[in-house]
């Protein structure tokens, strides 16, 4: 028997955190009855979301996708010109492990492994995400030093973590974050009067964007996939390892 939020995650629907939200919204049923947090499912139990039965994923799929600008990271949105689900059109239902806003581009990990999503998105794990950012005017040393030390964002009422950053050329810098605040890089730039012209995520943990054309994806396999699971503290079977 598995806790219902993990059961949903194992079906590749979403992370356990998002599954809890579905349960709170009373969109999940177990054998025809509304689910409550903490309930368990397994065996021949029928779990459904919005009346549609879900099934545990048989094979784990992990993709590295190069998201173009204009694609919205959502599965369903009637106002979105094009969603990431529509853009990839993969035969198995996949979910993104970490968003990029519509105007940003670059690497997104797509998978049907809910436990992998859960561990990748957990802020306490401080997983690295690397970006190349181009702005509208010259990048100064004081700006780079300020974002490296962490800065207060009034709109979010929080201070960013210390991070790695360096200037690449007059208008471009590289930054490595270990948190995922809403539009974090754009907000940090705005504090210094910069307008972001392009923002590309080039790495998530050990997975790099190298060689993937815009709008295309590649399957992550072999040692690269094993390293990703290991860094997340889970085995390929979904069991936690390494004391996590």
Image (cartoon, rainbow, N blue to C red):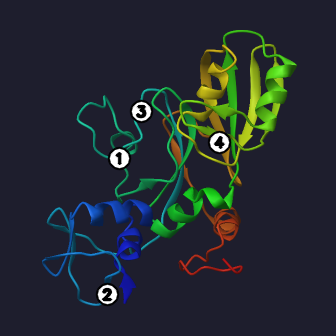
Q: Is residue 61 above or below residue 162?
A: below
Q: Residue at x 51, y 61 (%)?
A: 117
Local crowd size for mark 2, using a 10 Å CA cut-off: few (<14), some (14–19), many (≥20): few
Local crowd size for mark 3, using a 10 Å CA cut-off: few (<14), some (14–19), many (≥20): many
Q: CA distance from mark 1 to mark 3?
A: 13 Å
Q: Mark on residue 89?
A: 1
Image quadrant in which the C terminus is located: bottom right
Q: Mark on residue 209?
A: 4
Of pointers 1 and 3, the one earlier in the residue sequence: 3
- The reply, left or right, for residue 217 in relation to residue 77 is right
Local crowd size for mark 4, using a 10 Å CA cut-off: few (<14), some (14–19), many (≥20): many
Q: Nearer the viewer, mark 4 or mark 2?
A: 2
Q: Residue at x 66, y 13 (%)?
A: 193
Of pointers 2 and 3, the one earlier in the residue sequence: 2
Q: Nearer the viewer, mark 1 or mark 3?
A: 3
Look at mark 2 in the image and give the residue it sits on.
42
Which percent across, then down, holds residue 198?
60, 21
Q: Mark on residue 231?
A: none
Of pointers 4 and 2, the one earlier in the residue sequence: 2
Q: CA distance from mark 1 to mark 2?
A: 29 Å
Q: How many marks?
A: 4
Look at mark 3 in the image and give the residue it sits on.
71
Q: Is residue 41 above or below residue 165?
A: below
Q: Quadrant of residue 41?
A: bottom left
Of pointers 1 and 2, the one earlier in the residue sequence: 2
């Amino acid at each position: 028997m598995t806790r219902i939020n993990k059961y949903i995650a194992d079906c590749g629907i979403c992370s356990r955190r998002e599954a809890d939200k579905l349960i709170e919204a009373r969109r999940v049923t177990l054998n025809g009855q509304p689910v409550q947090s903490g309930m368990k499912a397994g065996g021949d139990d029928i779990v459904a979301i919005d009346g549609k039965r879900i099934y545990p994923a048989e094979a784990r799929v992990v993709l590295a996708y190069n998201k173009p600008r204009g694609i919205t990271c959502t599965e369903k949105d009637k106002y979105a010109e094009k969603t990431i689900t529509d853009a990839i059109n993969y035969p198995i239902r996949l979910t993104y492990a970490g968003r990029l806003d519509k105007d940003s581009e670059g690497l997104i990990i797509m998978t049907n492994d809910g436990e992998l999503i859960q561990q990748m998105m957990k802020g306490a794990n401080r997983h690295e995400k690397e970006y190349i950012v181009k702005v509208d005017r010259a990048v100064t040393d004081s700006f780079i030093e300020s974002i490296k030390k962490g800065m207060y964002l009034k709109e979010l009422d929080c201070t960013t973590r210390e991070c790695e950053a360096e200037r690449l050329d007059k208008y471009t810098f590289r930054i490595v974050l270990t948190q995922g605040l809403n539009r974090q890089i754009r907000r940090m730039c705005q504090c210094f009067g910069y307008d972001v012209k392009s923002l590309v995520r080039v790495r998530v943990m050990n997975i790099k964007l190298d060689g993937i054309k815009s709008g295309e994806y590649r399957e992550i396999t072999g040692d690269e996939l094993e390293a990703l699971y290991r860094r997340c503290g889970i085995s390929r079977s979904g069991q936690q390892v390494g004391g996590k």
